[in-house]
Amino acid sequence: MKHAKKAAVSMLAAALLLSGCSNSSAPEPPLDYALGEDSLPSLSSLVTLDSSFQFQESASEDEPDSVTYVYSQLSNGGETAEQYTKALEEDYNCTVSTGDTNLTAPDFSAASGQALVFQSPDGSDECFRLTVQWEETSCSVTPSLVPKDEIPQTADEAENSVTVEEAVAHMEGLSPAYLGLSGSSMAQYTIIPQDGLVRLDDQECLCVNVYLADTHQFQKSYLLTLPALQVYALDRITGQATPLGAP
């Protein structure tokens, strides 16, 4: 009888030991989500979760090179997603939307849903995106890199936006005389826009350089205000910009 009790105690100790090993091998939630040089704080770093929450990682179905981080056994998945995305928006200069063309706020009161979080690009052609999905008691986050033009715009921004191609076409439609150039047609010139935007009197402007098409010899530089496309002649030596008036 004593041997039986000892055997039972030994089996219980072994079970507890195995259980402890299993818990210790469970993945720990990361402090950040990172892809390449881009990263954002993780959900558990910015939101206080229930002590009983469970965490796991899985391969992303939509992003083959990424991982989906799943937080389950939450008291409210929608509220967790809302707290997390709000912190990213307010403290990390992120844009949050449902993924529509225009900027639309997610409805976190719904039993399930999705929010897309975009980290503003800094001169790169790509931006860092987090796909945040929630159910009643769970929330998942999938990081990915997407083209920066996927960042949604407000209705006003979409209406007032001007593409580089449209700005160049506007310059091509002006006369050389108006721009202070020789010749009778802009067809003899090549217009090359510079990367990025510059500011002139609190206005965003696109800078373009004009070259002779046949010799590639530099001629002049201009600033075009956005979205009005007011043209300024730019003196490269002094940095002075002079408005050209109505064409």
Image (spheres, rainbow, N blue to C red):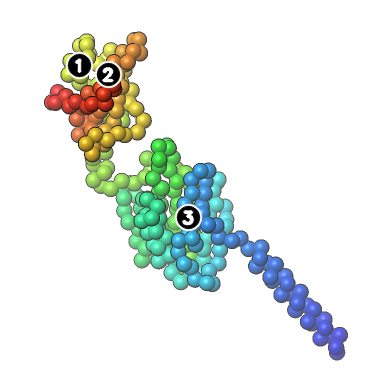
Q: Residue furthest left?
A: 246
| Disc 2 residue crowd, few under 14, some 14–19, many 20+, Cα 10 Å | some
Q: Nearer the viewer, residue 43 or 234?
A: 234
**Image mark for residue 222:** none
Query: Mark 1 highlights which residue?
Result: 180
Q: Nearer the viewer, residue 87 or 155?
A: 87
| Disc 3 residue crowd, few under 14, some 14–19, many 20+, Cα 10 Å | some
Residue 136 percent location from the top left of the image? 44, 68
Query: Mark 3 highlights which residue?
Result: 41
Q: Nearer the viewer, residue 238 or 75?
A: 238
The answer for how far apart the CA atoms under marks 1 and 3 are is: 52 Å
Q: Nearer the viewer, residue 81 or 223?
A: 223
The numbered mark, 1 or 3, whose residue comes first in the sequence reads: 3
Quarter of the image with the C terminus in it:
top left
* Residue visible at 34% across and 27% down in the picture: 194
Q: Secondary structure at mark 2?
A: strand
Q: Secondary structure at mark 3?
A: strand
The answer for how far apart the CA atoms under marks 2 and 1 are is: 9 Å
Name the quadrant containing residue 86.
bottom left
- Badge 2 amino acid: Lys
Residue 92 percent location from the top left of the image? 40, 52
- Badge 3 amino acid: Pro
* Residue visible at 33% across and 26% down in the picture: 193
The numbered mark, 2 or 3, whose residue comes first in the sequence reads: 3
Query: Mark 2 highlights which residue?
Result: 220
